[in-house]
Amino acid sequence: MGYAAITTDELLEQKRQIESELLGRINEELQNIDARRAELLAMKPAKPEEPAKKKRVKSSRPAKYRNPSNPEQTWTGLGKPPAWVDVVGRESCLISKEG
C-alpha cells in the first residue's frame, strides 16, 4: 500500500511516531558515545604538568634626563626620546649624578 492511499491525519501520526522513535534512538546513541568517551579518557595516561613559565620582571631604571620646564617628566635614555628632549636638547636635560 502506497502513501497515496493513506489520509493526511494518518501520515501526520506516522510522522510523529517516527520522530519520537528517532529522538529516542539519538539520545541512546549520544549516551553510548558519552560512556565510551569517558571510558577512553579514563584509559588515557595523565599528561605531565609543564613547569610554570617564569614571568619577566621589568626592571626599573633610574631616570637619566629630566624636563627642565616640567620636572615630573623624566626619561631613562632608553627607547624613543620624548618630544621635550629634542626641543630642549639632551645636555640641558641630563640629571647630574650625585653620590
Image (cartoon, rainbow, N blue to C red):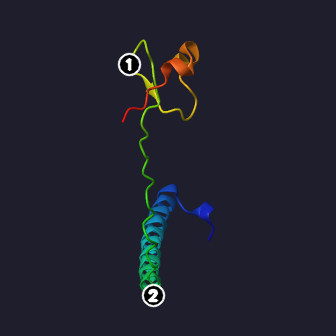
Q: Which residue is mark 2?
A: 43
Mark 2, mark 1: which one is toward the viewer?
1
User: Which x, y percent locates residue 14?
Assistant: 48, 65
Q: Residues within 10 Å of mark 2 (few under 14, many from 20)?
A: few
Q: Secondary structure at mark 1?
A: loop
On screen, residue 47 above or below 98: below
Q: What residue is rendered at 48% in x and 70% in y? A: 22
User: Which x, y percent locates residue 72?
Assistant: 37, 21
On screen, residue 80 above or below 17: above
Q: Secondary structure at mark 2?
A: helix
Q: Which residue is mark 1?
A: 71
Q: How far apart, in angstroms, are the residues tagged by discs 2 and 1?
A: 66 Å
The amino acid type found where label 1 is placed reads: Pro
Of the numbered discs 2 and 1, the one sitting upstream in the chain is 2
User: Which x, y percent locates residue 96?
Assistant: 43, 27
Q: Nearer the viewer, residue 20 or 50?
A: 50
Q: Residues within 10 Å of mark 1 (few under 14, many from 20)?
A: few
Q: What residue is rendered at 56% in x and 13% in y? A: 87
The amino acid type found where label 2 is placed reads: Met
Q: What residue is rendered at 52% in x and 58% in y? A: 7
Q: Nearer the viewer, residue 41 or 26?
A: 41
**Which corner quadrant of the image does residue 30 belong to?**
bottom left
Q: What residue is rendered at 51% in x and 61% in y? A: 11
